[in-house]
Amino acid sequence: MKEKLGVAVDEEILREVDELAAECDDLGVNRSEIVEAILTPFVQSETNHVEQV
């Protein structure tokens, strides 16, 4: 099951995500799918991101 989540991001990040979506236009992906593809491995990794920061 997926939940909707409203997130505010920097305009530069938005431009980058939009560029990725445009490059993947033939795949029919949208912003949400791109952000999910980026966040999923980050969240599922065993790295302690808090310690790294």
Image (spheres, grey):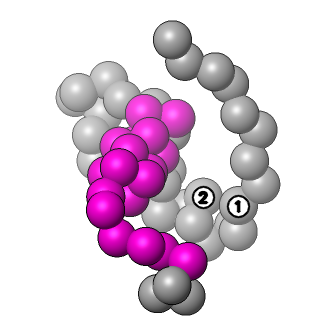
Task: Say if 12 sits above or below 14 in the image.
Answer: below
The question of residue 16 being in magenta is answered with no
Q: Which residue is mark 1?
A: 9
Q: Which residue is mark 2?
A: 14
Q: Amino acid at mark 1?
A: Val
> Which residue reaches farthest left?
26
Task: Say if 37 sits above or below 20 in the image.
Answer: above
Q: Residue at 23% of width from left, 27% of height from top?
A: 27
Task: Say if 40 sits above or below 26 in the image.
Answer: below
Q: Are marks 1 and 2 in contact (CB under 8 Å)?
A: yes
Q: Residue at 47% of width from left, 46% of height from top?
A: 35
Residue 42 drawn at (x, y percent): 38, 58
Q: Badge 1: few (under 14), some or many (20 or more) residues near its Cα, within 10 Å?
A: few
> Which corner quadrant holds the C terminus?
bottom right
* Magenta-drawn stretch, dominant element (helix, strand or loop): helix
On screen, residue 6 versus residue 43, left or right, reads right
Residue 40 drawn at (x, y percent): 38, 45
On screen, residue 19 versus residue 12, left or right, reads left
The magenta segment is 32-50
> Which residue reaches farthest top?
1
Q: Residue at 44% of width from left, 40% of height from top?
A: 36
Quadrant of the rendered image containing residue 50: bottom right
Asked whether residue 2 is in view, the answer is yes
Residue 17 drawn at (x, y percent): 48, 54
The question of residue 38 being in magenta is answered with yes
Q: CA distance from mark 1 to mark 2?
A: 7 Å
Residue 34 drawn at (x, y percent): 40, 42
Q: Amino acid at mark 2?
A: Leu
Q: Residue at 71% of width from left, 34% of height from top?
A: 5
Element type where label 1 sits in the image: loop
